[in-house]
Image (cartoon, rainbow, N blue to C red):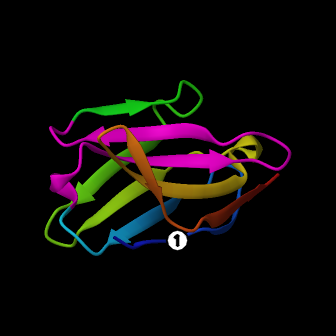
Amino acid sequence: VQLQASGGGLVRVGGSLRLSCATTRSIIRYDAMAWYRRASGKQREPVAVLTRGGDANYADSVKGRFTISRDNAKKTVYLQMNNLKPEDTAVYYCSIIDDARFQWGQGTQVTVSS
């Protein structure tokens, strides 16, 4: 399966972006879809996870600001990011999680300027 992430860019503090991750197969066939990010010099970390059943979980640092969602018909997962902060600057990756295995798409850069 291919994953195509898009929607990154440069935004000012307090701004918003919506990331999209399009897949080539039905996303509800997988255990979960997720967004991760890697800031410069840091390890990749989970941002948000959406299970097949529709349960969403978020990193504490983004709770209340980010929302993960999906459009099954479009085979796309989204990450709505509001009230962005400089510490949100990172390369964001979408992932399929299935049978405890990860499939990764290419990342999209998000830069938040102060």
Q: Position of residue 65 (x, y in %)?
A: 49, 39
Residue 75 in which image quadrant: bottom left
Residue, x 66% and y 43% (percent of image)? Answer: 44
Q: Position of residue 86 (x, y in %)?
A: 76, 46
Q: Position of residue 13 (x, y in %)?
A: 71, 51
Looking at the rendered image, the quarter that the N terminus falls into is: bottom left
Residue, x 37% and y 58% (percent of image)? Answer: 78
Residue, x 74% and y 41% (percent of image)? Answer: 87
- Amino acid at circle 1: Gly
Q: Position of residue 46 (x, y in %)?
A: 54, 37
Check residue 106 for magenta coloring: no
Q: Which residue is mark 1?
A: 7
Check residue 35 for magenta coloring: yes
| Other residues around mark 1 within 10 Å, as few (<14) / some (14–19) / many (≥20) | some
Residue sitting at the far right: 41
31 above or below 22? above
SS of the residue at dot 1? loop
Specify start and end residues of the magenta stretch as a single range.
Answer: 27-54
